Image (spheres, rainbow, N blue to C red):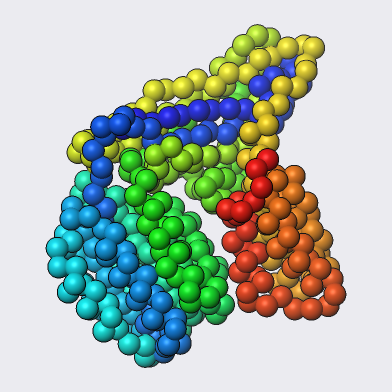
């Protein structure tokens, strides 16, 4: 398994007469493999809410979805299950899949009762997941339908960061309409996972299966993007780096001892691009083809039990001319629009929290137009509907707010091709 690494600038030309210019550097990264590449064992932890509010069809569908995942796991895969109400316990300790019927019996015995303590469930889940992380793809699915009423949300975020430090990916699933979207999104973002919304109980099976299929496509783990900038080139001061595919996430940037910048990528999927967008500023450059940056990926290959591998070091060039003509890259423009859609929606939510309904509606309309520019008609519909409701003096329901957040982060599956 190797890394496919493709850097592109939004405009590959620069004006030699300008003292400063801004560029967006999009870096597409994925795992690519040979036909005979060995498959990597999975290490899955289900962290499931079985509080009183999950009673009935909700818990029944979650149990069905969990049992179907047990059947999909291979004999080399590992599974652990943690459940929580106002307390948390390990239902199935981390183990290689052997006693499928016993595991499903444990799942089906679950009943709904009590309150919600997400942080305790997360703590135990990370502990179980860490036990099987060697040479595996290690991910957790955290499902809840409520607020962390018996826990501490800041503690959740600390555990999410700990998971990231241990190279564990956390995917969050909000069930129904009463879960805290800010906390579940921050948990998923910190541990480079996916945020999903299960609006109706019968969607649980599809959402679990979709996440599991995605987990199966992971080929490389513990990946970091390393990049260095040439003299007279710098990162933007505010929010310099974001992931824009498959989900939009604002990413922290660290500095290596050798001066290079690092961005954690986590798991790399086979033939599914992870796109990172860096906002950079170029100082005045001499005429000609100038190198402005180098990009490289450091990663582990669990199938071969190899860690700390490096991709090729790829230079990034800009053509500097006194008779400047733009040379725009349409794919990078799509990435810029994806990030704009996300940030416009975030601004709308901030305005709504401040009581500025008109400002929020305007920003949502702007985000809807951005989505249309991307060809993401489904997202545009959701965003425009929310804007129209605010303009009509209506309040956004919890369902509306959650749909808006989800479509701001990703391109919906049924969006038409651009």
Q: Is residue 150 visible?
A: no
For image coordinates 31% across by 64% down, the residue present is: 69
Please state, as top left, top right, bottom left or bottom right, where the C terminus lies in the image.
top right
Height in image: 6 above or below 135? above
Residue extending furthest toward the left: 98
For image coordinates 77% across by 16% down, the residue present is: 324
Relative image position of residue 402 (x, y in whole percent): 61, 69
Relative image position of residue 106 (x, y in whole percent): 22, 78
Relative image position of residue 391 (x, y in whole percent): 84, 71
Height in image: 200 above or below 249? below
Of the pair 380 and 321, the residue shown nearer to us = 380
Height in image: 110 above or below 47? below
Relative image position of residue 218 (x, y in whole percent): 35, 45
For image coordinates 15% across by 68% down, the residue present is: 99
For image coordinates 76% across by 74% down, the residue present is: 355
Please state, as top left, top right, bottom left or bottom right, where the N terminus lies in the image.
top left
Height in image: 368 above or below 7? below
Of the pair 273 and 116, the residue shown nearer to us = 273
Q: Quadrant of residue 205?
A: bottom left
Of the pair 418 and 17, the residue shown nearer to us = 418
């Amino acid at each position: 398994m190797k890394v496919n690494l493709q850097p592109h600038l939004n405009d590959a030309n620069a004006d030699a007469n300008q003292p400063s210019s801004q560029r967006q550097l999009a870096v597409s990264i994925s795992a690519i493999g040979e036909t005979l590449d060995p498959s990597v064992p999975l290490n899955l932890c289900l962290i499931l809410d079985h509080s009183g509010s999950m009673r009935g069809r909700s818990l029944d569908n979650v149990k069905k979805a969990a049992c179907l995942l047990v059947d999909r796991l291979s004999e080399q895969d590992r599974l652990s299950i943690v459940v929580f109400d106002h307390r948390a316990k390990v239902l199935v300790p981390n183990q290689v899949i052997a006693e499928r019927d016993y595991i499903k019996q444990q799942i089906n015995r679950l009943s709904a009762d009590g309150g919600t303590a997400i942080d305790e469930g997360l703590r135990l889940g990370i502990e179980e997941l860490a036990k099987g992380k060697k040479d595996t793809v290690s991910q957790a699915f955290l499902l809840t339908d409520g607020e962390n009423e018996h826990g501490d949300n800041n503690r959740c975020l600390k555990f999410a960061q700990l998971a990231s430090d241990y190279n564990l990916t956390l995917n969050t699933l909000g069930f129904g309409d009463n879960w805290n979207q800010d906390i579940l999104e921050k948990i998923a973002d910190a541990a480079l996972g996916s945020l999903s919304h299960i609006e109706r109980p019968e969607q649980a099976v599809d959402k679990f299966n979709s996440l599991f299929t995605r987990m199966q496509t992971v080929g490389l783990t513990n990946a970091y993007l390393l990049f260095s900038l040439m003299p007279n080139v710098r990162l933007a001061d505010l929010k310099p780096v974001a992931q824009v595919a498959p989900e939009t996430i604002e990413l922290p940037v660290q500095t290596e001892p050798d001066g290079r910048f690092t961005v954690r990528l986590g798991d790399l999927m086979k033939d599914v691009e992870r796109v990172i967008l860096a906002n950079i500023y170029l100082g005045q450059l001499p005429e000609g083809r100038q190198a402005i940056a180098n990009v490289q990926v450091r990663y582990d290959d669990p199938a071969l039990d190899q860690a700390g591998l490096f991709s090729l070091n790829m230079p990034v060039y800009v053509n500097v001319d006194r008779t400047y003509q733009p040379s725009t890259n349409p794919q990078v423009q799509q990435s810029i629009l994806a990030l704009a859609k996300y940030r416009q929606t975030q601004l709308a939510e901030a305005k709504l929290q401040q009581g500025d309904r008109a400002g929020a509606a305007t920003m949502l309309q702007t985000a809807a137009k951005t989505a249309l520019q991307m060809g993401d008609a489904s997202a545009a519909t959701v965003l425009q509907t929310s804007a129209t409701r605010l303009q009509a003096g209506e309040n956004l329901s919890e369902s509306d707010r959650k749909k808006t957040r989800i479509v701001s982060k990703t391109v919906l599956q049924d969006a038409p091709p651009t």
